[in-house]
Image (spheres, rainbow, N blue to C red):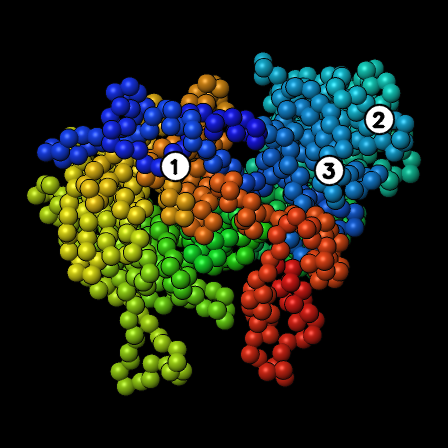
């Protein structure tokens, strides 16, 4: 949404914020005159009902504080081949709506080229004549020309159409226009290939091929005189004798079609015309490699003769057949010729890149990659290989040693969340709000086991200010180097991290992970106890782990693992909530066994032995200091377990609130207030919300509860419940779906967003608009709507930055976006800073940034962070034990480059 449009939307009267709380008399007048926009208040039956609202005349006089979205960071890399500049100094990676430029020497982001709103990137090409120019193709049929070093858009051509793929031929002569190729999709389901001359802004192309086959990709060779397209089962090739950009309307291609003996997943065309000295006019010696879904690779030398049967007179008798290579046990996702044509690189679901030497038939492997291989690209000089993996990472490998020279890691969320009831497990670091802690899968396998939910077994630390990956750490046992398929063919899944939270000072991290064996493994055992009414077929293992931050190693060190923190009937019970107590090293958990447990650290003692060689460093362990039985509050005598529950501490940490869903919709939900010190229930409140509880949080004396059908606020002092938002009043189609909640004490607001399902591409535009998720921000204590906007992608997590007053949204496209008030946005230094004016990777750009910084940008004067960075390089190690000088120099450069 544009800035002007968003500003007009916030200036509406219904979205205005009030700066002072209204009086009770004003509320009653408001309710009588404007009953449709009032909020309902539920009190005990002995008290009269009231409402908090403001008159429309007061709203007009108030000045609204506009809320603005920052530019999103993160994002998921699309299935487009990365590109490398001819000098191999920079790497281009495509996102859904942008192209990112990385420096290969430092693996850091230096530029983001953002396309227009509503457009998607379907391809990009570096200009071979001027490598400083980049062409970007979008799904709306437009192509833009960029000077990527400065980030300026130089030209734009296009017309409204639905494009699938694009490519470009750059003419070396300045007086001749470039030639653009587009693969278009028509309303009738037909596919077209259109050729355009980039002259005027409006493209007037000519259709050179139209077919009913679902062409997914195409490639061009011999300066546009050869076009090869594939639909999986067939290969279509078009040839022309000449391609004159000045007379593009008269170009004609001769098309031939050949059926493939396999179902192709990918292909790569190599032009070996430079090696053929006797090239006849109209003959195009091209080599083709096809990767198929069964794991084999077909090689066609001189594809026109071997596959399409176009033989010359003397070569008719020497017509060769295809050559077959087979090692992969799954689909081949990427295949690529080497620069000299002597090797072929391939990759698939095995997380292994294979190098095939064609003359000898020998294979060389690069095993144990972090995820399946998606794309393989050879640099223009042939000295490097670029490998894009399924876990949203890209590696640049040297062609000789196969050693990584650059590694780029994005936000590694699950590609497709298995369910809207499985939100992203994430938290902001309480002391370093720019660091996002998120649980991600150890490997992104995308085979026949897609129905199985991905196990989030790794903790990723991501810097949302500089848009860069910081670290990865395993939280559970992972199968990184072992076969992850059982004897019966069932997948072996890693434990799944369900909850995590960080203490207020960032010294302790608590996580819970659950592991469930495959149903085939427990089928025989479960059948023997199927007649027992109380027996459950689920045999999950639940672990509660406490981690301590180590400043020396910059990692979380496991201190205590609690096996089965909640249990019933001799089995582990699932955890339903985990929350950290403010101002103390303590955590609270609630489980299906209807118990609340409080966990705190204590000194570790070892009988007869010293606890630690260093007395100043205390060794800790965690234990349960108290528990509360909730079975008496569940309503039914035969109910012994919980299905859903939510926990929240008050701001001072003295009270713990827990939400329990009621058995009947008439009574509403149940809220219990627990004295943390004595571990006793002090007060209970029924009818506080409707539906299943999703999230809750304290904001002063107010307890804000988000459920599947409403958002309510309970004034714990006056015992008043206010319904701020309900499914009936909003008329949202996402009613019944979980709602995300975040509060911000800095600006006294809270935000709510429903995690509704996205409309698929087959849905109508009206249905997609109805399924959009809306984010709403309310002011406290007036409880007026101060901001409302729809989100393009389905939100998966909503976090609050208490230091800046911003809200952080993580969506299904792996985007992380900040939403802040305009007054605080100007003062923030957490904006994503572009390093584009430091593109040269020399020492001047690293050590002279303070002299070249734009005066309009705020200067970071945090010298302690720089000192900490150098301390991590040198530490307290004696001089005679330091590593080599080259290693020290590299670490110092990286330390300054990270600031």
For residue 171, above or below residue 715: above
Q: Residue furthest top?
A: 188
Residues 89 and 457: in front is: 89
Label 2 environment density (alpha carbons within 10 Å; few <14, some 14–19, many ≥20): some
Q: Nearer the viewer, mark 2 or mark 3?
A: 3
Mark 3 and mark 1 in contact? Answer it, CB < 8 Å.
no
> In the rendered image, which quarter contains the C terminus?
bottom right
Rate crowding at label 1 as few (under 14), some (14 to 19) or many (20 or more) other CA atoms within 10 Å. Answer: some
| Residue for badge 1 | 19
Tell me: residue 212, above or below residue 324: above
The quarter in which the N terminus is drawn is top right
Which is more N-terminal, label 1 or label 2?
1
Mark 3 crowdedness (10 Å alpha carbons): few <14, some 14-19, many ≥20 = few
Question: Where residue 294 appears, x then y in whole percent?
Answer: 56, 38
Asked if residue 123 shows in the view, the reply is yes
Closer to us: 251 or 100 = 100
- In the rendered structure, which disc, 3 or 1, sits on the residue that comes first in sequence? 1
Task: Find numbered disc 3 in the image and state the secondary structure of the residue it sits on.
Answer: strand
- Tag 3 residue: 152
Q: CA distance from mark 2 to mark 1?
A: 60 Å
Q: Is residue 310 left or right of residue 705?
A: right
Q: Secondary structure at mark 1?
A: loop
The quarter holding residue 114 reads: top right
Q: State the residue at coordinates (57%, 31%).
A: 3
From the viewer's side, name the closer residue of 854 and 633: 854
Asked if the residue at tag 1 contacts the one at tag 2, i.e. Cβ–Cβ closer than 8 Å, the answer is no
Q: Earlier in the sequence, mark 2 or mark 3?
A: 3
**Where residue 177 is drawn, which disc sits there?**
2
Q: Is residue 408 visible?
A: no
Q: Is residue 5 left or right of residue 417?
A: right
Disc 3 and disc 1: Cα gap in Å? Answer: 42 Å
């Amino acid at each position: 949404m544009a800035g002007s449009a968003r500003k007009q939307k916030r200036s509406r009267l219904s979205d205005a914020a009030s700066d002072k709380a209204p009086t009770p008399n004003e509320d009653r007048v408001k309710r009588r005159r404007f009953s449709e926009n009032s909020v309902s208040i539920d009190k005990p039956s002995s008290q009269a009902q009231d409402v908090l609202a403001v008159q429309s005349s007061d709203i007009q006089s108030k000045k609204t504080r506009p809320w603005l979205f920052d530019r999103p960071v993160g994002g998921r890399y699309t299935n487009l081949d990365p590109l490398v500049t001819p000098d191999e100094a920079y790497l281009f990676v495509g996102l859904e709506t942008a192209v990112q430029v990385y420096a290969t020497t430092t693996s850091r982001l230096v530029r983001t080229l953002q396309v227009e709103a509503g457009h998607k990137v379907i391809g990009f090409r570096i200009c071979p004549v001027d490598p400083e120019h980049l062409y970007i193709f979008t799904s709306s049929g437009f192509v833009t020309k960029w000077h990527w070093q400065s980030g300026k858009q130089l030209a734009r051509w296009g017309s409204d159409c639905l494009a699938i793929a694009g490519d470009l031929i750059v003419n070396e002569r300045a007086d001749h226009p470039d030639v653009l190729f587009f693969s278009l999709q028509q309303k009738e389901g037909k596919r077209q290939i259109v050729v355009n001359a980039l002259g005027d802004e409006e493209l007037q192309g000519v259709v050179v091929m139209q077919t009913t086959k679902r062409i997914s990709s195409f490639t061009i060779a011999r300066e546009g005189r050869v076009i090869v397209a594939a639909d999986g089962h067939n290969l279509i090739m078009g040839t022309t004798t000449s391609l004159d950009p000045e007379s593009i309307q008269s170009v004609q291609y001769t098309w031939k079609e050949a059926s493939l003996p396999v179902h192709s997943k990918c292909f790569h065309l190599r032009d070996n015309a430079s090696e053929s000295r006797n090239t006849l006019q109209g003959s195009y010696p091209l080599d083709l490699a096809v990767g198929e879904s069964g794991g084999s690779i077909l090689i066609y030398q001189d594809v026109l003769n071997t596959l399409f049967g176009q033989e010359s007179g003397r070569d008719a008798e020497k017509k060769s057949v295809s050559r077959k290579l087979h090692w992969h046990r799954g689909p081949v996702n990427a295949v690529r010729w080497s620069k000299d044509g002597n090797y072929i690189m391939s990759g698939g679901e095995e997380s292994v890149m294979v190098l095939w030497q064609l003359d000898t038939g020998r294979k060389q492997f690069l095993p144990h990659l972090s995820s399946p291989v998606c794309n393989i690209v050879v640099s223009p000089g042939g000295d490097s290989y670029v490998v894009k993996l399924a876990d949203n990472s890209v590696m640049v490998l040297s062609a000789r040693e196969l050693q990584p020279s650059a590694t780029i890691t994005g936000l590694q969320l699950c590609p497709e969340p298995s369910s809207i009831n499985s939100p992203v497990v994430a938290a902001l670091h309480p002391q370093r709000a720019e660091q996002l802690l998120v649980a991600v899968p150890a490997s992104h396998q995308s085979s026949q086991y897609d129905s199985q939910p991905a196990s989030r077994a790794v903790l990723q630390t991501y810097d949302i200010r500089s848009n860069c990956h910081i670290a990865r750490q395993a939280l559970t046992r992972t199968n990184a180097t072992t076969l992850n398929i059982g004897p019966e063919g069932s997948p072996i899944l890693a434990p799944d991290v369900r909850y995590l939270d960080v203490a207020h000072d960032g010294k302790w991290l608590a996580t819970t992970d659950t592991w469930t064996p495959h149903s085939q493994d427990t089928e025989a055992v479960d059948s023997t106890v199927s007649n027992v009414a109380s027996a459950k077929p689920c045999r999950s293992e639940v672990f509660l782990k406490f981690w301590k931050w180590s400043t020396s190693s910059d990692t979380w060190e496991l201190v205590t693992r609690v096996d089965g923190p909640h249990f019933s009937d001799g089995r582990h019970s699932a955890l339903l909530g985990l929350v950290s107590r403010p101002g103390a090293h303590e955590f609270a958990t609630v489980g299906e066994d209807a118990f609340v447990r409080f966990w705190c650290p204590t000194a570790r003692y070892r009988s007869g032995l010293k606890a630690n060689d260093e007395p100043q460093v205390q060794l800790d362990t965690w234990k349960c200091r108290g528990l509360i039985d909730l079975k008496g509050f569940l309503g039914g005598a035969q109910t012994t377990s919980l299905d859903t529950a939510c926990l929240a501490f008050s701001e001072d940490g003295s009270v713990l609130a827990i939400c329990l869903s009621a058995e009947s919709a008439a009574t509403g939900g149940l809220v219990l207030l627990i004295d943390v010190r004595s571990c006793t229930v002090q007060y209970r409140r029924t009818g506080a919300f409707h539906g299943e509880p999703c999230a809750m949080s304290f904001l002063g004396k107010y307890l804000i509860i988000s459920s599947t059908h409403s958002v309510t606020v309970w004034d714990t002092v006056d015992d008043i419940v206010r319904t701020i938002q309900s499914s009936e009043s909003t008329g949202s189609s996402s009613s019944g779906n979980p709602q995300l909640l975040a509060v911000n004490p800095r600006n006294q607001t809270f935000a709510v967003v429903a995690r509704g399902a996205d409309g698929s591409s087959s849905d109508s535009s009206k249905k997609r608009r109805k399924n959009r998720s809306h984010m709403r921000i309310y002011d406290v204590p007036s409880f007026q709507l101060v901001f409302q906007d729809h989100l393009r992608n389905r939100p998966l997590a909503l976090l609050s930055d208490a230091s800046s007053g911003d809200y952080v949204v993580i969506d299904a496209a792996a985007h992380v976006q900040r939403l802040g008030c305009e007054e605080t946005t100007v003062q923030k230094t957490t904006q994503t800073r572009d390093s584009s004016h430091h593109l040269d990777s020399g020492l001047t750009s690293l050590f002279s940034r303070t002299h070249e910084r734009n005066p309009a940008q705020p200067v970071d004067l945090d010298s302690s962070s720089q000192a900490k960075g150098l301390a991590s390089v040198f530490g307290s190690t004696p001089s005679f034990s330091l590593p080599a000088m080259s290693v020290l120099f590299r670490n110092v450069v990286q330390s300054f480059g990270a600031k």
